Image: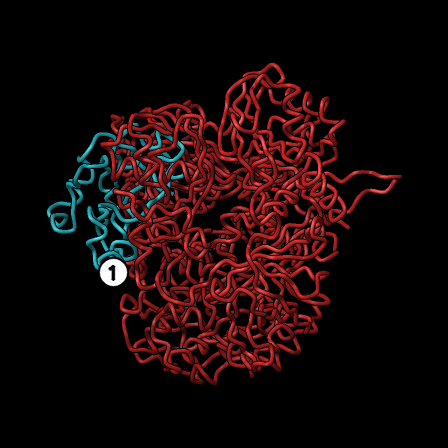
Chain colours: A red, B cyan
Amino acid sequence: MSQSKQQVFRLATGGRIDRTRTLSFTFNGQPYQGHPGDTLASALLANGVDIVNRSFKYSRPRGIVAAGAEEPNAIVQLGSSEAAQVPNVRATQQALFNDLTARSTNGWPNVQRDLMGLVGKLGGQFMPPGFYYKTFMAPASMWLTYEKYIRKAAGLGRSPMEDDPDSYDHFNQHCDVLVVGAGAAGLSAALAAARSGARVMVADEQEEMGGSLLESRETLNGKPADQWAAQVLEELAGCENVSLLPRTTVNGYHDHNFVTLHERRTEHLGETAPVVNGHRPVRSRMHRVRVGQVILATGAHERPLVYAGNDVPGNLLAGAVSTYIRRYGVVPGRQLVLSTSNDYGYRAALDWKEAGCEVVAIVDAREAPKGDWIDAARAQGIKIITGSAVIEAKGSNRVTGARVAKIDIDAFKVSGPVQELACDTIASSGGYSPVIHLASHTGARPTWRDDIIGFVPGLVKGVQACGGVNGTYALGDVIAEGVEAGIKAVATMGYTAQTVNIPSAERLQQGPAVALFQVPHEKPTLRGPKQFVDLQNDVTAAGIELATREGFESIEHIKRYTAMGFGTDQGKLGNINGMAIAARCLNRSIPEVGTTVFRPNYTPVTFGAIVGRHCRDLFDPERYTALHQWHVERGAEFEDVGQWKRPWYYPQKMSGKTETMHEAVARECLAVREKVGILDASTLGKIDIQGPDAREFLARIYTNKWEKLAVGKCRYGLMCKDDGMVTDDGVTSCLAENHFLMTTTTGGAAAILEWLELWHQTEWPELDVYFSSVTDHWATMTITGPEARKLLAEISDIDLDRDSFKFMDWRSGKVAGVPARVFRISFTGELTFEINVQANYAMHVWQTLFKHGEKYGLTPYGTETMHVLRAEKGFIIVGQETDGSVTPEDLGMQWCVGYDKPFSWIGKRALTRSDTKRENRKQLVGLRPKDPKVILEEGAQIVLDPKHAIPMPMVGHVTSSYYSPILDAGFALAVVKGGHQKLGETVYLPMADGQTHEAEIVSTVFYDPKGERQHV
Amino acid sequence: MFYIYCPYCGEHREEEEFHPKGQAHIERPKNPEECSDEEWGDYLFFRDNPRGVHHEMWVHAVGCRKFFNITRHTVSYEILETYKMGEQPSITAANQTQSREAAAVSHQEGVRA
């Protein structure tokens, strides 16, 4: 097949494409050809592909409407393999590359013959706005069933199910001036800013910088406008202080001039980044930029007119028609009817005519349009029908004709006879809507301007708008405004601006536009053919009118009821028309109705770019203790505790079989109770506290007393917030008169340090005390069990005699030849020594312990065994037995509360509030299941009467529950209302599977109730 | 994401380095035992939620670890000033109507628009 036959709508000359090279691509399985410089959309139009999608709700055939980011219909799925799938790509923004593979996002089995279309045709009558809400609300239980089908029918692209072969990254940057958009305004601003020496970034979302200059009919300095753009870009490219970012969308404008830019680095080259020198370059990049001054030069989107059948393929924006002809050398049809409310639309007809195709008529809503472009059209012999509009497009899979009539805009009615013009393309222009999205991200409300019939951005500090986004459209004015913005921006940043010669532009005669949004039809809106406002979400003028009739008056409510402006589209084409229709129905002005809020992102951003390098191993930092490698080699299973990796248990291989967790934990528990076990406790938070007032500080921050703790002694402490609720616990040791070592829970270490600093810095700055985290400085090895003393005695010079080194003492000395602090504290209830050594000596000490420990049966144990052993003793874990609503008294830990301390310590006053004093608070108790084989579920709810009708009154829940190997029975800790008074009573635990467990409320101490073993 | 001037470091840093700690200038009653339950409850639980100028405490958590105060506009999110612990704000809801803009820019070195 020859090229011309394939690309039947391609012009022989013109456009910014390279006709010397041909690219192949497939769309919905069909092979096509295009050229470098094409977008997927321009190549599809060149090949005469009319239908690119099926609509979201009604499944109507849809064609390409626009030529840029505002395209609502041509949303495609890219990728020839599973791993390369990319959803929701606008064909108008996707550069063509060889072997590109694209599919329609909607439409099954295909867009030409769509089964859902039948449903749409039938369902359309029954699918008013709010249809889903109204229809599928009841019964609520059926929603999951409905949803599955609705989602399948709706279709919004799909994510790949395989790993992405590409890599993505983030750049964190600063600049003085960020110019958003590299059209006439942006280039002028960038040039002015760049010449001052300020650090300038210029971001533009298109393949090529230059914006509308690339397709302009106008001249600058007497030459085609694109030549001026090329000249400016050349100068900017040569400036060291300027970075030019093409294919980069500024997607979010956040607080304090923080701006996120999505740079697509290889999307124009292939579906995955092509390998260069054996490396796959970064596919796309997120620039996170803190900007001094933002210059918005985002331009304006043309607004389509809302008329019946305006969604049939062949209805395009007037400006898009010009873009396809002038930039891509494609005429998207043969016979054009143009419907316009302004002078700008005329350019499409002039371009069409110059391309050698037929302009059937220009239909102008104004009675007596006057201006240079109108004169040009008349000179070309184009028929102009005034005071009229296209009221309806005919055709189903492609426009076949336009129904044209005189209209009375003020009375909103058709005021003359209707004539039908045969044509295959209808271009419409209702004027321009400035692209105010980014400015809206900052929360600034836009301002309506009657003179330009559009909203201009409300501005926060540090931002300026110039050109189209500011409602300035005449080329000469746009450039002057851009230069001014650039000069102002650099001046604010302390740079001296240099002169910029503003190129001379033609001064065109233009007439005023008329405010036309929805075009009246002979039939009332609710009964006439569909007039689409938001093509992507299938929102019609009738839908908006119905919403207002049903009482939705706020534009935000109308948006949510109709879905206008939702989705990847974010209301780029439809929003202003929708507001205008709402205003008409509510008999208000557009500024009274106001706009909805645009939110980031401006266009969809791939998750890869959002995530950058923060995935897989780099998702979150992992912290390892000094002994980690030993645990790995020993085959430990690990548990995440905060960012720490802690050994969970050490399964052993026995005769080729690996122990289950249950078996391993049982073995580890018994080893501790009967011989000796060892735990890597290095992750416990350690805070070094020094200063003359350290002791006073501890007394204020902890619930218990500290004034008498002597050097060489340790004490367990409870910490509350000032609401009286337990927030942390741990042992603090007196190292010297002015020197203490506090331990915290592993997960709470950083927060507790901040908590100490908070009180010191804000309430008690007069206390002379200093805090320093030493968690990583020390490794902690806990040896515990009846043989612990014998083991330690073999390798330590410390006097371990039970009467000189008592329980809750600490001593310094050498262990395995290394300076150590040894703490005789216990979290297992057994004889325990916690050996602390400088972290880099830890492996030596640990290995020495094992060398000597084998004969004592030294067994490494992990966090699971630690939990079982401490629970057998009724020792709490903050965050497990407590949840921010538990007081020391609820825990039965009055022994740890210094009621008579002189200073009203943190949490004390709250313990006498009416709520903390009330009867029936949940209190910590032990639970012994009646059936010892039962292990209660943690979190299980407790009731007193299992025969009570549902919902049963719940009196508490299980906080910890394990199998105890030493007791050979299940046991649990729980909080129960008034539990301290209920010892011996029976409670019930109804489970999800219908079983009900029975348990007795008992003491929290299940093993060694007198606490003798830790004192041996 | 905020751009916060730490009055101790004397530099602007990204919000990621800081933790917000709620309303500023909440003083713990000197004699808690003399407070009624209601007074103590007010101290513990009740905070202002103004539309406009608000004083907040923040901490430079992964920087100098110092607590300090921020005067922030809750509508524009603009940070009008930051000041050290123990100091009083120069911009308040009462006086902010007198040329808020000017104060915001010139109040301290390093505050950029």
Judging depth in this view, the residue of A393 and A761 nearest the camera is A761
Visible in this render: residue A846? Answer: yes
In the visual, does A3 lie left or right of A690?
A: right
Circle 1 residue: B37
Name the residue rendered at 89%, 39% in the picture: A655
Q: Residue furthest right?
A: A655
Residue A572 quadrant: bottom left
Judging depth in this view, the residue of A527 and B56 nearest the camera is B56
Q: What is the chain letter for disc 1?
A: B
Visible in this render: residue A221? Answer: no
Judging depth in this view, the residue of A690 and A311 nearest the camera is A690
Q: Residue furthest front?
A: A803
Coordinates of residue A737 in the picture (x, y in percent): 35, 24
Coordinates of residue A497 in the picture (x, y in percent): 26, 28
In the rendered image of this protein, does residue A429 appear above or below residue A696? Answer: below
Inspect the image, locate mark 1, and give the three-letter code of the amino acid beneath it. Answer: Asp
Residue A560 quadrant: bottom left
Q: Secondary structure at mark 1?
A: helix
Task: Indicate the quadrant containing the C terminus of chain A: top left, top right, bottom left or bottom right.
Answer: top right
Coordinates of residue A255 in the picture (x, y in percent): 35, 45
